[in-house]
Amino acid sequence: MNNITTTLHNTLKPLIDTHGNIELIIAYSGGIDSQVLLHALTQLKQNKHICNEITVCHVNHGLSKNAENWQEFAKQECIKLSVNFIVKHVNVQIKAQLSLEALARDARYDALKSLRSKRSIVLTGHHSDDQSETFLLALKRGAGLKGLSAMSAQTQLAQHLLVRPLLSVSRREIEAYADVNQLTWVEDESNTDTCFDRNFIRHKIMPLLRERWPSINNTINRSASHCLAGQELLDELAEQDLSHCRLSDNSLHVKALIELSDARFNNLLRFFLNHHHCLMPSTEQLKQVRLQLVAKDDKNPEIKVAKHFFRRFKGTLFLTPEYKDISDWKTSINLGEGDSEITLPDHLGRLVFSHPRAKDKQLAYICLPKQEQQVSVRFSHDNPKCLPDFRQRSRSLKKVLQELDIAPWQRKRIAFLYYDDELVAAIGHFICQPFIVNDAELGLHVSQGDLRESTE
């Protein structure tokens, strides 16, 4: 075996069993890198070094006028090599502050994630020159150790294992392999466009660096490995700090957080955000989070971090999504003899209004509305006086919600039940006493559930 097939075999051997139970999926563009990977892998199978099923996945982005030709080329190559072929069409939506290359890459990985429900090994043709370019791109962005670690040889991709078996192989070796084996491949015309940062580094910067320092590729890859080792140590430290500071999956103890040094605080929050698949914050954003943690106790500060918010409430720092303003949302509902259901906005699930059976053991129900009363659900209120089931005296609704220790942002997401314009219940929290009945035949039960439950 040559260096490429040997490297590929040595990478895969510890990951696959001798029975070939795990499927090997090649992320295949039809370019020289993925073409060499496909050829080398099929050679291993033909020579009985592996017995796993091989599937080629070609992602059609539709970004080039040649996209359909590349798809047909990929199909014919798979027919020639007798391997499974799957096409995934993706629609790359342009977004502010994200490069087209990054968006296309994310779309590819999303397509690969959805390919199989069973765990598989996904292989890409990334090589050592790609690794150097990725390192320099991260350096250009001012990335920390995580970014400068560049690409990992192995990483999780949803339920799959993503493997880059050729990271130690150079582009020259790949070109030599293609030449010896008389391979053909497609050329993406965008690869020569130096308006893209990666192409600028590939065609303008790396040739200069190699001319001055011929071994620069190996040197950069070694630095990326050192950064990866450093990042692994930081992750171990973050795990320890998280176990000390975590209150729940999405909340942290403020007092424990502010006792950390700035460096450990930043490291922990980045680790915590990565765990929740959030975009990484800037150093300035992390500085603002720390400053807001020591705000006065009567304040409930919130800091936007990408598409999420850090919100402080009663000694706890919560990570939440960016909620929509639903204060104007309102819907009417007809409570006839049968059960009724409504879908709430902004992923709040659904409300089910059911008529209890006489054998139900619940102590309190919401009384049925009078025939002429209009029943509605809304999220706004004018702070009425109310007498919840757990109080002896009436109090303003705002004070009651504070009394229940409900965080300010969650108070805006409570569904209120009204008969005409009179508050009946804060669903999930209390029923107003004038609307409570103990007789199941005269009552109504309201439950709030996940939207997924209604589709199962």
Image: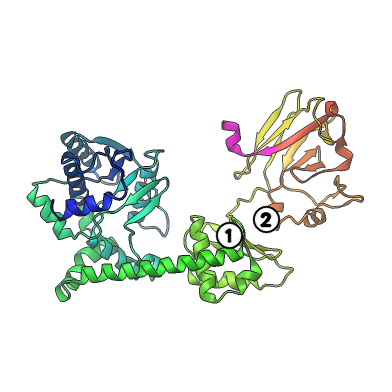
Does the magenta-highlighted stretch encompass residue 82? no
User: In front: 114, or 165?
Assistant: 165
Whichever of labels 1 and 2 marks the residue nearer the N terminus, that label is 1
Task: Give coordinates of residue 111: x percent, y percent.
Answer: 37, 43
Read off the residue under disc 1.
309
Q: Is disc 1 surrounded by few (<14), some (14 to 19) or many (20+) residues within 10 Å? A: some
- Count of numbered marks: 2
Quadrant of residue 166 in the image?
A: bottom left
Read off the residue under disc 2.
409
Q: Is residue 374 above or below residue 125?
A: above
Type of amino acid under label 1: Phe
Task: Give coordinates of residue 124: x percent, y percent.
Answer: 28, 50
Type of amino acid under label 2: Trp
User: In front: 156, or 432?
Assistant: 156
Q: Is residue 89 visible?
A: yes
* Horizontal side, residue 95 vs residue 297: left or right: left
* Horizontal side, residue 321 vs residue 313: left or right: left
Where are the magenta residues, as a range? 448-456
Q: Is residue 232 above or below residue 106?
A: below
